[in-house]
Amino acid sequence: MSTQPAPAPLLIACALGIEHLALRTGDRSGAGGPVAVLRTGMGPKAAERSVARALADPALAGAAVLATGFCAGLAPGMHPGDLVVAEETRDPRGSVACTGTDLLVKELARTLPGREVHTGPLTGSDHVVRGEERSDLRATGAIAVDMESAATLLSAVRGQPRPVAAVRVVVDAPEHELVRIGTLRGGISAFRVLRSVLPTFFEWHRNVLLPRR
């Protein structure tokens, strides 16, 4: 009698303690396999190192990798609490195509009705982006920017092909910069949204699972 291979794990990577708290306290009952939530620390170098170290663990062999957390929106009309589903991540070292983007968009619309979901390229930066630099990045076609997603996915696919994705919650947008009044309210909204996206991540994972090798 043959046995089914164990499902590949899911590694969810975020940078900040507040993001990690949101993900740890969300509903994890719908997971389709082992799930690890990794706090990488801020910045692309920290993300790259942390993800490479995590994926070297045999317990995470063949893991699907999803980068998440907060981001700065680049497109006019974005608001704190909006969602960004990356079609690809970019940084100066290259781009990584994301897996299952359409599924993520569909599931987010189902689980968070009324919440705006934006799709397009997500670009990386090694610092917080403000002012004119935001416009310059928008001119490249990117719809949002953060410091860790591109490095996370580059690190994830360096060793072997695997499903990868990036889903971010807008906390800072062109008309709602962090330095303005209302930042706290926007941050609370983004935290609540991030805490609510785990069922979508698990549905994505179930549909892109790779068997253990």
Image: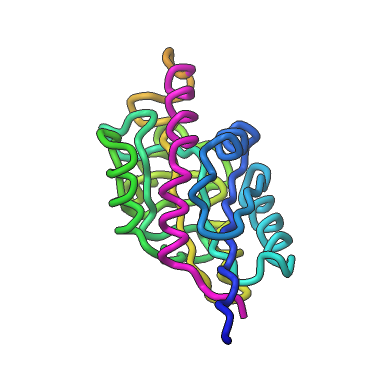
Please state, as top left, top right, bottom left or bottom right, where the N terminus lies in the image: bottom right
Residue 18, quarter of the rendered image: top right
Most foreground residue, 88 or 13: 13
Task: Point out residue 12 in the picture as x, y percentages from the top left corner.
Answer: 57, 52
Outermost residue on the front side: it is: 1
Task: Point out residue 36 in the picture as x, y percentages from the top left corner.
Answer: 64, 53
> Range of the magenta residues?
184-213
Residue 205 is a magenta residue: yes
Residue 90 is a magenta residue: no
Residue at 37% in and 24% down: 176
Task: Point out residue 87 in the picture as x, y percentages from the top left corner.
Answer: 36, 58
Q: How many marks?
A: 0
Residue at 57% in and 36% down: 19
- Above or below 11: residue 37: above
Left or right of 157: which side holds 57?
Answer: right
Outermost residue on the bottom side: it is: 1
Please state, as top left, top right, bottom left or bottom right, where the C terminus lies in the image: bottom right
- Above or below 208: residue 160: below
The colour style of the image is rainbow
Residue 93, quarter of the rendered image: bottom right
Outermost residue on the top side: it is: 181
Residue at 37% in and 40% down: 83
Left or right of 45: which side holds 1?
Answer: left
Most foreground residue, 161 or 71: 161
Residue at 66% in and 45% down: 39
Q: Magenta residues: mostly which secondary structure?
A: helix
Task: Point out residue 144 in the picture as x, y percentages from the top left corner.
Answer: 39, 44
Most foreground residue, 11 or 88: 11
Left or right of 52: which side holds 23?
Answer: left
